[in-house]
């Protein structure tokens, strides 16, 4: 069962068939030195570790340590997941990679995905991590994932104190094909309730198969490498979304367009619109060569225009009669967010 995925990685539930991989991972000198010696020496030991650890946690908690593999080849490279550990009040995140896959950004990538999934699917608002003070590599991963050092703890049955890091969670994440049914339902509802806000209509989008929506959320093809959709969740339900797409032609590839912004009415005072816009802008900054983000907002939608303005967008013109809604026409305000301007506003 796939738990979550990124552009390069897939995080999925372990099975007993993973015993050989787990046996190797748990006996790597780097694992024993930095984490612990689990005493797993045979395939049967590895199966017992899986049965009593990750597999039992899936049943008891709905989450646990998972297999991390490369999407391109299916090769297992490590494990990562959420753990409800005795002696700790909060859920913590754990991770370990085979040595040959370290220092390539995989740890940060899978930890972020697991955290996002945990916030959305399990309504987690706080996650901790415990690490040996001399494990500098792991501490760097935690810091890049937004964790802050909180203090020192001693786990039950242990005598050596270790450091505890913590991170406050937000209910947003990048959507993947597994979210397609919820994304489709959310957008069709938005097209129906707010026809003047979108160029697409209910009839057009409703006729498209679920595979189209899954493809929109896929990151594995070259055509989708520069498109992303982010969602906001409440109690595991998708209640808001926004998308980004980069201009495909070389001379325009420095431009990204923000599209399909929606938050359900009953959740519009919870800060989810701000979360979605900021998440999209932060992601756009990771795309090489991108210098600006563009969008259009319906003329007269002052609430939405104010949200974008708070995030560094500036209006530069109005397109009259931009969208036909039945027998009437509505204009669109064009806005842009040059990253230099956004950085200046953020630091003010």
Image (cartoon, grey):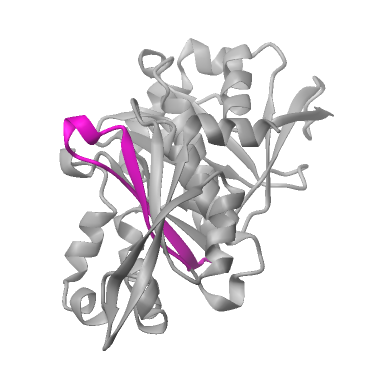
In the shown orientation, is residue 168 left or right of residue 114? right
Residue 10: image location, x then y, percent: 33, 41
Residue 48 appears in the picture as rendered: no
Q: Which residues are magenta?
A: 236-262
Which residue is located at x 25 percent, y 39 percent? 225
Residue 191: image location, x then y, percent: 35, 77
In the shown orientation, is residue 97 left or right of residue 254? right
When the figure is inspected, residue 250 is found, relative to residue 160, above or below; the finding is below
Which residue is located at x 72 percent, y 15 percent? 133
73 and 335: which one is in front? 335
Q: Is residue 85 magenta?
A: no
Name the quarter where the N terminus is drawn: bottom left
Which residue is located at x 66 percent, y 46 percent? 91
**What type of secondary structure mainly makes up the magenta span?**
strand
333 and 124: which one is in front? 333
Residue 2: image location, x then y, percent: 35, 51
Residue 58 appears in the picture as rendered: yes
137 and 254: which one is in front? 254
Q: Is residue 252 magenta?
A: yes
In the shown orientation, is residue 78 left or right of residue 276? left
Q: Quadrant of residue 42?
A: top left
Residue at the bottom extreme of this rendering: 327
In the shown orientation, is residue 78 left or right of residue 128? left
222 and 129: which one is in front? 222
Name the quarter where the C terminus is drawn: top right
The number of numbered badges drawn on the structure is 0
Residue 264: image location, x then y, percent: 51, 74
Q: Quadrant of residue 274?
A: bottom right
């Amino acid at each position: 069962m796939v738990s979550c995925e990124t552009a390069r990685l897939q995080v999925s539930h372990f099975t007993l068939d993973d015993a050989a991989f787990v046996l190797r991972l748990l006996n790597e000198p780097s694992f024993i030195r930095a984490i612990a010696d689990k005493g797993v020496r045979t395939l049967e030991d590895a199966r017992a570790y899986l049965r009593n650890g990750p597999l039992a946690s899936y049943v008891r908690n709905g989450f646990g340590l998972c297999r991390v593999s490369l999407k391109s080849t299916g090769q297992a490279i490590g494990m990562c997941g959420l753990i409800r550990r005795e002696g700790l009040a909060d859920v913590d995140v754990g991770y370990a990679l085979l040595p040959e896959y370290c220092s390539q950004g995989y740890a940060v990538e899978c930890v972020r995905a697991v955290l996002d999934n945990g916030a959305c699917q399990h309504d987690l608002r706080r996650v901790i991590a415990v690490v040996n003070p001399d494990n500098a590599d792991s501490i760097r991963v935690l810091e890049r994932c937004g964790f802050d050092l909180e203090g020192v703890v001693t786990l039950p049955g242990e005598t050596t104190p270790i450091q505890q890091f913590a991170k406050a969670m937000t209910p947003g994440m990048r959507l993947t094909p597994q979210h397609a049914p919820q994304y489709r339902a959310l957008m069709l509802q938005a097209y129906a309730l707010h026809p003047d806000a979108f160029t697409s209509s209910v009839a057009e989008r409703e006729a498209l198969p679920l595979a189209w929506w899954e493809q929109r959320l896929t990151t594995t093809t070259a055509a989708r490498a520069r498109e992303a959709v982010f969602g906001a969740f409440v109690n595991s339900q998708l209640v808001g979304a926004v998308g980004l797409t980069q201009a495909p032609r070389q001379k325009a590839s420095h431009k990204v367009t923000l599209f399909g912004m929606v938050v359900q009415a009953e959740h519009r005072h919870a800060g989810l619109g701000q979360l979605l816009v900021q998440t999209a802008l932060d992601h756009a900054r990771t795309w090489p060569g991108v210098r600006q983000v563009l969008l259009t907002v319906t003329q007269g939608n002052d609430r939405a225009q104010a949200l974008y303005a708070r995030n560094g967008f500036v209006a530069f013109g109005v397109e009259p009669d931009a969208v036909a809604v039945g027998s009437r026409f509505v204009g669109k305000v064009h806005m842009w967010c040059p990253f230099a301007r956004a950085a200046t506003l953020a630091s003010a």
